[in-house]
Amino acid sequence: MKKLFIWVSVLLCLVSCNSVKKYNEQITTLHPVADLHNDIDKLYKQLTRHHPNLYQYISKKDLEFKFDSLKTSINTPIASREFYKRLAPVVANVRQGHVAVGSVSKQFKRKERKTLLKQKFEFYDLDFEYLEDKLLVTNTRGKDSTIVGLEVVNIENEPITNVVNAFKTRFASDGYNTTLHNRFIGKGFSRFYYKDKGFLDSIQVTLKAKDSLFKKTFRRVPKKDKKAKKDSISEKKIKPKKLTKQEKQANKLAKKRKRKKDKMYGYISKTKNYTRNLDFIGKDSTVAYMNIRGFTNGNYKRFYKQSFKKLDSAKTKHLILDLRNNGGGRIAEIAKLYSYLTDKDYKFVNKSEVNSRIPFLKFFMSNTTPLALKVVGGVLSPIIIAENLMKVKKKDGKLYYKMRESKTRHPNALNYKGNMYVLTNGNSFSASSLISTHLKATQRATFVGEETGGAYNGCVAGIYKIYQLPTTKVKVRMGLMQIEAPYKQNPDGYGIKPDVEILPTINDRVSNFDAELDWILKDIEKKE
């Protein structure tokens, strides 16, 4: 039995190594023109088959012309990464922010991955923001804090304006608004650079401090060795303090409370921040500030229940909901949050238009779905199909899926009735735009900041199909459900616009000044 296990392990290792080698060869080879054209045709077929609102912002004729022009322009063999750079701008013409084209990157063998896990790339410690056509370093998790607030002039001698302008063509907002582009580029700059250049061991960046320029090289360096640190402490022969039974119990309870808090508030280990936050501004708790960075991780039900209990007990008069840089997440969470912000019965979303009677099976059975998940999907397929068939109905020649959030609901008993403000910017996208549509349409809040990157009239998201092109191995994500609130605005294709537009400046960031929040606090003072 032991020998069999060893042989199986060796065989799996060999298969894995060969598949990694084969994949890396595939993405770096120059593909024949006919095969590249075939990938383009297959992608267009997938989009027309699965995307329920493909021609919302571009006509069928114009989109077909774009794809045909791409095929005409590719008349010599190219590798997968170059193909991604040509394909992404064409797909961006769909103007649906949830349709995304991924690049291809080198895969690593198990031994290489173990080595890489012991390292970190210093460049990825940086946070950026793109303001006034300049890329600014806004934060670092590394040691050198002196670069915070500096402007990035070029990377590897390539002007930053050229880099940013190229990145902007490879993704879309929902519809015609442009506020998402600058914000999204800043927030995800490192990720965009990786998609463009691939795996790197070092990057040379030219930074500007006032009128002087200097170069700084960011490298792949070893992570801190916690074990070695412990060993060095033990060498000093410092005996740990012996804890009493009560102290041990207190430590145990403190760790338990920390775990519960991390789960409820949604702890983000990379930045050491929480997804959800509630603070009171001032001494008398009349102004509450709720910052929600995303609708993804953590126990949101408990957070909102406790938060609105606090608001009710404190008799809070003003609530500031900060949705800036909130890229979205769960519909269930925003529907729950909205139940605390309205005092009327409501229907959160309409029935979702889909292109299949079994959309969840399409989601499970993509060509990128891991084999184990496909097996699970196959086993559960009778249940999935039955559930889908019950919830998908045909009306006026179109298919609609009835979500739980499309039922009429009652407001929560703890619903907040006071004055309210909402902070948004171009990175307020998807789910954060959806709840903003409700709050704007019902005139529940004063919006301050910038037009959202997500559309007022909804988006195609919900569940996704991720399709991998056969030759180039480029992956494309597409939403399968039209998600929209029961409110509409004309013209279509724009976000939720602020009542008071305030755009941050470089001086604001350097001086750590929040102009949008400052305006709200001054407005509250006037009302008081």
Image: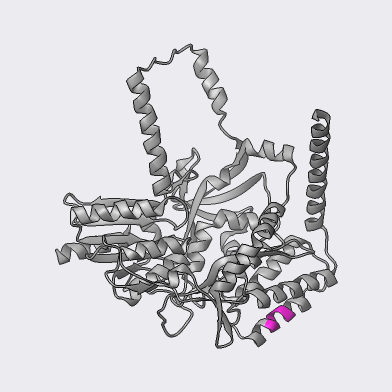
Vertical placement of residue 241 versus 373, above or below: above
Asked if residue 394 lies left or right of residue 132, the reply is: right
* Colour mapping: one colour
Residue 18 place in picture, x, y as percent: 83, 46
Residue 205 place in picture, x, y as percent: 58, 50
The quadrant in which the C terminus is found is bottom left
Q: Residue furthest left?
A: 528
Vertical placement of residue 115 versus 108, above or below: above
Quadrant in the picture for residue 520: bottom left
The quadrant in which the N terminus is found is top right
Residue 479 place in picture, x, y as percent: 58, 69
Residue 294 forms part of the magenta stretch? no
Quadrant in the picture for residue 60: bottom right
Asked if residue 464 lies left or right of residue 468, the reply is: left
Nearest to the observer: residue 351 or residue 19 = 351
Vertical placement of residue 498 versus 3, above or below: below
Which residue lies at the image location 50% right of the left edge and 57% below the top edge?
Answer: 187
Asked if residue 86 lies left or right of residue 179, the reply is: right
Residue 66 forms part of the magenta stretch? yes
Residue 158 place in picture, x, y as percent: 63, 58
Q: Which residues are magenta?
A: 64-68
Which residue lies at the image location 71% right of the left edge and 72% below the top edge?
Answer: 43
